[in-house]
Structures are given as C-alpha cells and as structure tokens.
Amino acid sequence: MTDKAPDRGKKAIVVFKPSGKVAEVEVGTLLSDAAVQAGVELNLPCGGQGRCGRCRVRVEHGAISHHSGVRLSTSEIADGWALGCASVVKGDAVVLIPEQEKIAVQYITKTIGAERIALAAEFSGEVDPSVRRVHLVIDPPSLADQTTDFDRLRRELSAQARISGVSASLPMLRTLSRDLRDADWDVTVVLDMGDPTIDTYHRPRLIDLLPGDQSDRCYGVAIDIGTTSNVVYLVDLARGKVIDRASAYSGQIAAGEDVISRIIYAQKRDGLRRLQQMVVKTLNGLLDELIARNQIPASQIGKAVVAGNTTMIHLFLELDPKAIREMPFVPALSQPLPVTAEEIGLNINPQATVDCLPMVGAYVGADITAGVLSSGMYDSEALTLFIDVGTNGEIVLGNRDWLITCACSAGPAFEGSGVRYGMRATAGAIEEIWIDQRTYEPTYQTIGEMPARGICGSGMIGLLAEMFITGIVDKGGRVRRDLPTARVRVGDHGGEYVIAWAEQSGIGHDIVITEVDIENLIRTKGAIYAGFEVLVRSVGLELAEVEQVLIAGSFGQYINVEKAIQIGLLPDMPWNRFHYLGNTSALGAFYSLVSRPMRRAVNEVAKKMTYLELSADNSFYEEFMSALFLPHTDISAFPSVMRILERKAK
Amino acid sequence: MTDKAPDRGKKAIVVFKPSGKVAEVEVGTLLSDAAVQAGVELNLPCGGQGRCGRCRVRVEHGAISHHSGVRLSTSEIADGWALGCASVVKGDAVVLIPEQEKIAVQYITKTIGAERIALAAEFSGEVDPSVRRVHLVIDPPSLADQTTDFDRLRRELSAQARISGVSASLPMLRTLSRDLRDADWDVTVVLDMGDPTIDTYHRPRLIDLLPGDQSDRCYGVAIDIGTTSNVVYLVDLARGKVIDRASAYSGQIAAGEDVISRIIYAQKRDGLRRLQQMVVKTLNGLLDELIARNQIPASQIGKAVVAGNTTMIHLFLELDPKAIREMPFVPALSQPLPVTAEEIGLNINPQATVDCLPMVGAYVGADITAGVLSSGMYDSEALTLFIDVGTNGEIVLGNRDWLITCACSAGPAFEGSGVRYGMRATAGAIEEIWIDQRTYEPTYQTIGEMPARGICGSGMIGLLAEMFITGIVDKGGRVRRDLPTARVRVGDHGGEYVIAWAEQSGIGHDIVITEVDIENLIRTKGAIYAGFEVLVRSVGLELAEVEQVLIAGSFGQYINVEKAIQIGLLPDMPWNRFHYLGNTSALGAFYSLVSRPMRRAVNEVAKKMTYLELSADNSFYEEFMSALFLPHTDISAFPSVMRILERKAK
C-alpha cells in the first residue's frame, strides 16, 4: 500500500477541496487512505481495485503519482483527473473530491420504492424468547445474613424463579451493588437464558437490573444485513410481534458494491475495521430511528438476532473474510459465538446478546439458513426449491428430511452492474416494460412514475423477455439489425435497442440496452438455471418433480414469473408452484428471536444442509453452457415458451 | 464534591508548582481533583477524609476556600497552607505541592527490607494447570473439505487431543484464519481448560494460537494484592515452579493507607476507576520487571490467579466496595467470575483468564482462603488456629472437617498508623529492641543498620514487651513516672519513653513512645486476642486445646513469639506450636495456578468457612475489654508471663 521509495517515512500534507479538510500522511500513502484519514468521503464501489473509476478526483496542485488510468481518458488525465484508489501521495498536494453519490444516507424507508416492500412479519408459533424478565422482591442483607449481593441475587432467582447458574459480565457486576440498593431490593432482573443445546450459549446471563416491576416490557431486534440494504425489525418479545421496522442502504456500499469488492477492501490497511464500523453505523442509524419513533430506550432492547450472507456476517463481526474469496472458499466459522452489543458497538443494551445465525459455507450464509427456516421448507413434505437471487444465486433443494444447497456466482447484472443503464430499484427505474409486436415501440412503468433514469432488475427480466418474444433479439442474444424501427441501431457496444429517447428520459440522453448488456444478463440467468439443474440432478431427480419454488429476497418478489420463464431464468412449470416470500432472512432472524425452538431449528437446518461446491462439480460448466441461450439450448424443457414462439411464427 | 454557588459551571485555571502543570476546572472542584486532572501527584493517605493532614499544599495566589483546618495550625493557615482534599477552587490560583512521599515507585524488591522475605514457593503435588498447550498439524481446507477454520480447529482438537466444546472470544476469532494460514496449519493451540466444577468457568477457551510446536513453554502469574504491598510470582506452568518474583508497595497507598480510606476514596468522582488503574499500574510494573528479567514475552503468560483481601479484590475488579464498609458489611460477590486480562488491563496475554480466588465475607477475603489452602490447614487433622495480622486481624479456627473465621478490626497500629513514630518496615525502622532492667537504657537494631527513623510493627511488639517486663509501663499501659532515668518523661501526650535521643536518631529529634501510642497498641493486640477467644469459645473449646498456631502474612513472620505472648497478643502456649508461614496468600494463588485440584479445594475451603460477625456477637466486647491489659485481665491465662513477673519481683 505504500511505495518503497527512499523518501518513505517522509510526511506530506494533502488538502481536500471543497471541504478544506487536511491529512498529514506518509509519502507513499494511497490518496483514498489519505481521504479516510482526513475524514473526507470518497466512495470505492469496487473496493479499491481501480476497476470502476468512481473514486475519481482532480489533483489541482502537488505531487501525486498515478498508477492506473484504465477508467480515465487521456484528456481527463491531462486535466489532472486520477483515481483515488490507485494514486499515491508523493508530496504536498491539493485535491478536489467531486460530490459523492449519497448512498449511505439514503434510507429506503424514506423512498417511494420502500412502500412496496410488504411483509407479513408474523410468528404463529409459541412465543419463547431467550430474554426473560423476572420481578424479585429480595430480603436486604443483615448482620444475620451477610450473603453477598450477587450470591443473594442468584439465591433468589433460584428460589423465586427456579433459574440457576446465572453468570454476569464484569460491567454488570460493577453496578450490581448500587443498583440493588438504589432499587431498595425490589428489582426486575433481565436475563438472557441462552439455550442448553447450543454449547457456547447455554448459561443464563444477567443483562440488566431495573428498579421495581418492569417485567411486562421486553424488546429485541431482528437484523438482516444485506450486501445492498440493511433491515431492522423492532420486536416486542413478550408478545412475539414486530412493532416497527426500518431499512437503509448499507453504508458499506461506499467500500464496494458486491461482496467480492468488500473482501478486497477488507484487505486494505484498517479496511476490515472500517467496514465493521460502516455496517454498525448504518444499523445504529436504523436503531436510533426505531428508538425515537417508538419511544423505547436503547437499554430496553435486550437482544439482537442477526442474519446475512457469510461475508456480511464476517464483516459485522470483523472476522477476516479473505479466505471466503480464495480457493477453496472457507469461512472463519459456521456458528458464530454469541457476543455482546458492547463488543460490536450496537446501540442497544450493552449487555444484550448479539446472536448471528449459522452459515453453511462461503456463499451460503445465515440469510439462507434463516430463509429455509422462515419459509417453512425445513418442515415441509413437498419437494421444494428455495431460491434467493441477488449478486449470487443461492439455491436450496429438499424437504423436511434432507437439504442440499449451492451458490452460483450469477454476477450483479440484475442489481444494475454490468448493464450500462442498470440501476437499483429506486425512483426513476424502469420496473416493467411491454414492447409492441408490430411497431417495436415500448411502454414502460417507472418507480415513482418519474422520467426514466435506468432499468432495475425486474425491468431487465421483462425487457429481455419482450425483446426475445417480439424477435428484437434472437435466442443467441444478438439484436436483429434489419427491423423497421429507429429504436434498433448499432452503437459502440454492437447492436442496441433504445428504450427511451433523450427527450423522454430523465438523464438527458437515450437509454439503451446493448448486446454486451444482454450477454451479461444471459450469463447471469444461465448460471442460476444451471445451478437448479445441477442441484436437482445431483440427487437423481428432474426439475419437473419440484412441487414448489419459493422465491426469497427483496428482488425476488418483483420477478415476473412469466417473463422469467421466457428468458429461461426460472424453470417452466405451472405458475401456481411459484411463491414469493419477500425478506425471508429478516423473517428467520425474527422467528429465531422470539422462539428458542426456532433458534434451535435453524441450527439443525444449517447442520442438515449439504453444500455442493459448483466449482468442484464438472457438470456445472456443461449445464451453464447449455443455459447461455434464450430460453435454453434444449427448448423442449420450456414448453410454454415453445408454444408462444410457435403461435407467433404462424 | 462541588459547591452549589451561583458561579458553578464557571472555569478556573490552577497552576501547580513546582512542576508548572495546569488544570482548567469548574469552580467548586476539589483541589485534589484538580491535581489529578493536571497530572500532579498528591497523596491522600486517609482517602481524602481530611483526617491525616498529609495532602497539605500552600496556596500562593488566588481563590481557594478551605473547608477544614483540623490538621493545620493557625499560623500555617495564615501562611497559606491548606488540605488538598478539603479545599475548593473558587477562581484562578497558584498552588505549591510539597514533595510527596515516593511510595508508589519504591519497589520492595529493591530495598533492604525485602531481602529478608524468604519464601519457599514450592508445590509438591501433581502439576495440573488449567492452561494447556496442544501441538496440532492440521490438514488444510480443500474443495473436497470446506469445513470452516474454527470448526476445523475444534474437530482436530477433538480428534487429536480429545478436547471438545472449545469456545473463543471475538478477538481470537478475528485473527484465527490468518494465524492458521500464516503457520501453514502447524500450530500450538493454547487453551484455558477451565474447571468442570466451577459453573462460570467450565468450558475450554482458546487463548492463543502460535506457529509450530511451542507446546513445551507455558507461563502464568500468581498475584497477591495486599493493602500495602503487591507481589507477583512468575510461574513455569509446565513444571509447576516459581521462576522469579517481584514486589512493590501498592500505588493505591497514595489514595489511602488502609482499606477503609480506600473505600472512602472510591466514593469520590472517578475514585473507583482511579484505584483500579493504580493497582493495575503497580502490577504491570512488576510484570514488566519479570518479563524483562526473564525474557519471556507478555503474550506467553497465559493465566493469572489473584488473591487479596475482599476490598483489594473489589478494587482490582472495579466492583463498588461501598457496602463492605457499611452495616451489615456485604461484598458485591464471593466468587469472582473469571475475566480476561484485556478486561482488567493486565499486561499479559490479553485473552488470559484472570481468576480471583473466592472470598468469605467483607473482612475475610481471598488472601485468607488462599492462606488456609496453602497452609495445609484445610487438610489437617490437628485443631489449628490460622492468623493473619495486618490492619485487620483475620483468624481461622478448625481442621479438615470444619472451619470458622472472623475478622477483628485491629486498627493499623502495627503498620505504623496511630503510633507517633510508627513506620513501615523499611530502612531506618527499629525492628528489635532490648531494655536494660536496671538502667532502662535501650539497645536496638534497625533495618539496614541505619540511624533510627521510627519503629515498625515487630519493633513495637518488642518495645511494649520490654517496657512491661522492665516495669516502665504497668499492666494498664501507664508509664511509671518515678523511674531514675531521663528517658521517662511527660510530654504533650502524657508519659513517654525516649527510645533514641535526637543526636542518635536519623530525623534530628527524639524518637519516643507515648501513653497514647501504647493505648493504641493495647487496643490492637486486645482486639486480636479477643477474636481468638470468641472464635474458640463459639465452638465450645478453649485456647489451650489448639494444637498449632499458623502465623501468616509478611508482618507475621517478624513477630517474636516470646514478646507477643508477653504483651498478650498471642496466647500463652509452648513456642513449638507456633509456625511462621510467610505470604500464604501469594502461595495459595500459586498453588491454585499450577493445580486444578488445589483451585477446586480453595472453593471448597471458602464454602466450608463459617463467618462469625464479631459486631453481631455480644461476647466480643466483653472479651475485648478483658484484653485491654498487659498481658490480660486474667493473668492466669498467661502462666509463662506470670513466672517472669514473679521471678522479677523476688
């Protein structure tokens, strides 16, 4: 990260404009590290690999060496532009940081898009949280009974509530004597009872001591840490109900848009610690929102259960994720040990247990085990295919008796990366589109009914399906150049289709989809479909035998099944076998929070899941190659699509 | 601690001379708090009660309000002298701090006195420490075996060493993946195995991971936190041997000389935290000394076992000691839960367990349970009286079947307080004295053979005995005024005896013992003797039935039994029943460190000990009153003393 030049160790002053913030750094320091030191925001969406070009800065004066110009034109470089992640401070300098995309502060709950996330966050089983409140009236000590404070408390917990073997952390013991006396020995004891079946979490632990009888109030939070967005449910533990929820884009997006970029960022100096602080900052923002809106003090929140993919859980706990990315793809652990909110920095009761759900492998994380739990799949007799499509496609096949899982590196095409006008599902994104069979003119709908700014994942699936069915693209993904419409043309990236003309768009120029975009989309859907095939065949079955397909993830619920079948993303089967489940990860965290039997079940789920490593499976590549067509090389596997094409051909 | 005057909230600048250090404080702040803020040393030997007068300062300019002049003369007050602990800043001021007694930096190991502390720190039982090192060669992960790092480590520990259920803290897990790979999967795992019989400490816990085979090296420390001095033994855990030891006066002396003063200091703002930091600073100084001298890295020290009285253990753990001092005298806890070195701030391996031994009551602490263990009393058939004389006299009576204990608030007379020329056992202290029967001229021996500066505890016992046997004092403690010697005279505090004339003394004036001093000494010895009587009689026995008397404590080993019997401090029985044991507290910590069976035994000892609260026992006051004579009201209980007096009378 630093030059080995002889002037190493020398200091240089870097002034960042427009804020005027200053960093004094060693010569040889990366400009992006200098920005961190100065407290200046400089997003690194690719994790600082020099790939995305979005950390561009302009050097106004001084000595900066530029190590990469991949994303910059010759004239831009001549004009002083440089990439923050690939430039090194050589001496004093003045650097202009352009305005950064404000990702971290854009709360989903405050955007129009979020209104559409409808989730029935209810738990119908028996409410049995690990957090328990016990009201105790204790005889104060006397010369005749000099039992110590903690021994007295334990004695009364055993006598009055049959709870024994309670432990306590040092910070709790430090205030114990005063708390008991201030409350005049009439207290509500807040305990995390743990779970006898979880060996690292089986003892009751004192987490708070409150004056008087406060045994009726008891809160917890269920947290889903997504790569893109984070969600927190505030839960009334006594009633087993979600009271409120809040979500926001991950503050980590500034350090990489996908898990691989973040793992790369984590290898930078202080990168891992910074990533941990970023996720905690985002979550604390959500907690503060929930606390303020519901007027519940942070200290009353006595537990957090956390789900998320393997990388997100590693970054949350500040565990080194390096080996997740490198062959043979191994996480630091599968069952995170319970920690306290204080250790993590989460703004709830400092003694609250933070319980991360178990993971299966490097790319099948706690979001999937939570999903298998909350979907009910783990307890179903029907042969079920559970899918969560995001940057990676995670797939689980099985029923109550067995579970097999794999992850396909689908790529972030559906999330907007690798597609020129791809974007997240926020205001101005095209989410649905129809193309006229004869005129090739599109009709589309945008989020927030605003002028189009780009296309989100569901829009891309719809667009590709419409272009295929109307014949704008052929089954190989090539745009037909002979159509009688100005919307089809040849651009820098080969054939392209104009979705919105500059005048109608919200960005001042044409919005198009190119053959390169289409190739990326086909690779993505092909990887996922190949995953289905390999998984099903690995247990000697056929896709047609699958009785239900459960689609998880916030993106999943916007997938139009008909269109997804038409492009060969989903298998061709009756639509009533498909079910949208929404955020099954947050739901699984919620279930595990309010029910210890559910918490045990998710551990059983994780143990039961057999992880199929696709990179070690020869059949995957074959299946993937076959799936790189619309809808598939073997059109007979898509009878409904075949019928449409036949009808059209008539 | 602050005035409620309307100028509260206003700031004032206090300059401390001669250092020139400055504090900016709120008006109303105590001068002693301002000194802490400025980083200026100002000792508060009485804990800041305004009693001892040793925090005197001179106000040269500015506005300081003086709340107490108890320890200052009118002329001193007129001259600007004030007590730092009882004066309040009213505005900007310049304050001179006289040179402070350099207690905190005076290492006992470097003084002459310490050379005399000879201790056979050996353990003859089977060495079985809780810290265990296991060398593992682990198959690295592969695509065929993607077991996570922590699961893999646990699997190999189970397979290769039959150790299961290992837990790990977050900091350990954070470096695990890198450590395993850096060591190329050839590692030495350092574990604290815990103890299955201790419910809060029963799981094996990972404390370090080292490259290659380092299973032969394994260290720990046994710590004794005394009120006056702290001792650390560096122990080779593999061999069960003390390698080296270091001791120093407690840095807490600056905040009070006895436990009561420290408890008072702990109630001041930040006082408890400061006391915790003081003891850790002293211990870290000793650890640094041991680490440097033996060239053992701090990280190789994998465990600390700590003994000390109840208040010292509370302050070490930063537990509020307030209730120890107030009726009905209740500690926060009896069995401290194991914590990590990191939580405490101890400079050994941050993950090392710091295990404080169990306490019995407010004034019978882990020093006594450790002493009962290391003395072997807990396993002896003989009726044993165990005594530890310091500020308090702690007494244990019993054998392998039963144990009963009490603490007598003896007062700090033997430690130098309440006796005008009393001092600690350092250079210049009179430690032995003989008085000529006819001339009343004394012959004495000082520590370091330097001119006398005062009298230490053993010297006081000898002096009082000699004065009594030679008839200088009568059995009521009054100095006979009719003796033919200039050494007996009447001073400000009644009759007094000149031990050293100004010319011979090391302090430029006469060293005397007064009737007030003698009264304090008699009260102290009387309280201890009364304790023996009450304890023995509470179980229906007589003192004469005691088969052995074990004298613990570093002071204890300097007590001359003959003289102690003559003043009625020790019961009159054959000298061969008395045994000096030295620092049984440190020794008990050492035994508990190297042997898990011994660690279990000390818990059994603590549970078995019945605590007799003397302030709730009517017979104590009666026994105490009877013991306020030389040697005792009932001279028949001291037949050997009776014979000497009879022989003399002839």
Image: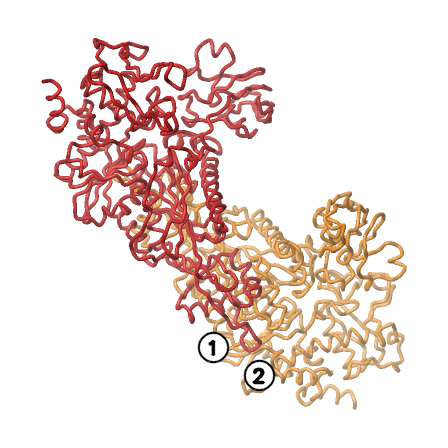
Chain colours: A orange, B red
Instruction: Name the amino acid, label 2.
Output: Val
Helix or strand or loop: what does disc 2 sit on?
Answer: helix
CA distance for labels 2 and 1: 16 Å
Instruction: Name the amino acid, label 1.
Output: Arg
In the rendered structure, the residue with mark 1 lies on which chain?
A
Q: From the image, tell me which residue sits under label 2.
A: A536
Q: From the image, tell me which residue sits under label 1.
A: A400
Answer with left or right where residue A260 lies relative to residue A429.
left
In this view, A57 is above or below B410: below
Between circles 2 and 1, the one closer to the viewer is: 2
Dividing the picture into quadrants, the one containing residue A104 is bottom right
- Residue A120 pos. (x, y %): 55, 64
- Residue B530 pos. (x, y %): 20, 30
Helix or strand or loop: what does disc 1 sit on?
Answer: loop
Answer with left or right where residue A393 lies relative to residue B69.
right
Q: Quadrant of the N terminus of chain A?
A: bottom right
Q: Nearer the viewer, residue B644 or A617?
A: B644
